[in-house]
Image: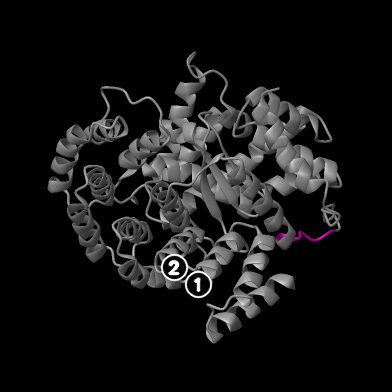
Amino acid sequence: MRPLFVVLLAMVCGYVLASSELPSLGENSAINIEYETRLGASVYERLLAAGLVETNPLLDRYINDLGHRLLAGLDIRLREYRFFIVRDDAVNAFALPGGFIGLNRGLIAHAQSQHQLASVMAHEIAHVRLMHGLDMMKKGGEINTATMLTMLAGLLLGTVDSQMGSAVLFGGMAGGQQAMVNFTRENEYEADRLGIDLMYQASFDTNGMVEFFTIMGQLSGSSEIGDIEYLRTHPVSNNRVAEALARVKNKSDSGDQVDDYSLFRDYLQYVSKLHIPDQGSEYLRALAANRDRAYQQADARLEALYRDSNENIWYGIAYAENLEHLHRDAEAEKIYRHLLDIFPGDYVLSMQLLRLLIRVGRPQEALDIARRVEFENPGEQQVYFVLSEIYKSLKRPALQMMAEAEFHFLNGNSRQSIRLYDQVLASADADPATLSKAREKRQQLLK
């Protein structure tokens, strides 16, 4: 067993076996959405803590924008969905309880457009919306702690080793494996139907689903790829492809033509520090030069790309970051501000500008921007990390600790938050308003 298996299995075991409130999900029980969400959030947080989730804000924003476009088509929405990239090169995607949907880096690498990736996301949203995972577990009888454990362990382990993951997944379920596979196929048809509807309503090209089926079919016969976990949990049959083809014919006139998917995929390859081939795009080769610290070479490529498309965030951020490496901070700042004029309040651009201002010693100017970003993005923990740096530069320790406390709270460390609020309450630096807020926050955490 690989070491990562141990990490993933411990994540699930540590939460599920420690819980005494696992709801019964048999025939006569109601589904506990709140518990389902907390379970999924706990597993997601453990994946995050283990470094298995890609946290780059530009990449994260891209897939969540796609996901929320699709969610707009749901008639009933009981869950707050969260989409994330898994740092693994296996071709896979999965949905955790509560609507936490993971997309493996390997799957993203093989999709060729935002419409194809959206088809996978729409399909996973449909599984969650139609509660297929829970129905599959109920098919084997009453759900207990061990069943939930094996389901989640199989799901997560499958992102690393397909044979081990599938063995755990199917081995932990009651009933025969063939019956489980047949039931899954029925779910696949239902998820495809709803997924196509979601794509159409969100103006994605529904042909993307059939195109992705074709790619999976080609990969399944490739000796270089080997076993594909996505096809184990999402089998693609000729009948399934035929039905999808028939449905998209009636809904194939949708799909906008603006597609930055290739830039997103290139940037993911760059951030992941994967090998970049010489025949890659001009953008990818520029990113490769930046990564190799050939900043002058990257500057020439990125300047040309940005000059031809100075409203493109992907080009602009890469160009500005490279300019910062060349100590041309004023030019980098000009690019960030230009793009913010086009995209007012954009979180990623604002954070890029904030970090530049802090680095060049302009904390008061950064504070004005950071307060606006905090107001517009209250749940983003990195905002509070930046605020703590700003207050440290301004020599305002009480406010620095307040920002750090909020950062730790959003990071799941309530104990550290309480300690910091205690330090604020004991600080001579804190004004009455700060003391009052610290007491209120501390009391909320103790409830």
Which label belongs to residue 391? 2
Q: Is residue 182 magenta?
A: no
Q: Closer to the camera, 136 or 415?
A: 415
Residues marked 2 and 1 touching at CB (< 8 Å): yes
Magenta region, residue range? 29-33
Whole-percent x and y of residue 293? 28, 32
- Around disc 2, counting alpha carbons within 10 Å, would you say few (fewer than 14), some (14 to 19), or many (20 or more)? many
Percent of width and height locating residue 47: 62, 43
Residue at the farthest bottom position: 432
**Horizontally, is 179 left or right of 83 in the view?**
right
In the rendered image, the vertical position of residue 262 relative to residue 231, given as above or below: below
Residue with the mark numbered 1: 399
Residue that appears at 74% across and 59% down: 35
Place residue 278 in its image quadrant.
Answer: top left
User: What secondary structure is found at the residue carrying circle 2?
Assistant: helix
Vertical relation: 401 (above or below) 38? below
Does 325 sit left or right of 252 as displayed? left
The image position of residue 197, as x and y in percent, is: 48, 53
Magenta span dominant secondary structure: loop
The residue furthest front is: 428
Residue 32 belongs to magenta span: yes
Residue in the foreground of this view, choosing between 128 and 242: 128
User: In which quadrant will I find the C terminus?
Assistant: bottom right
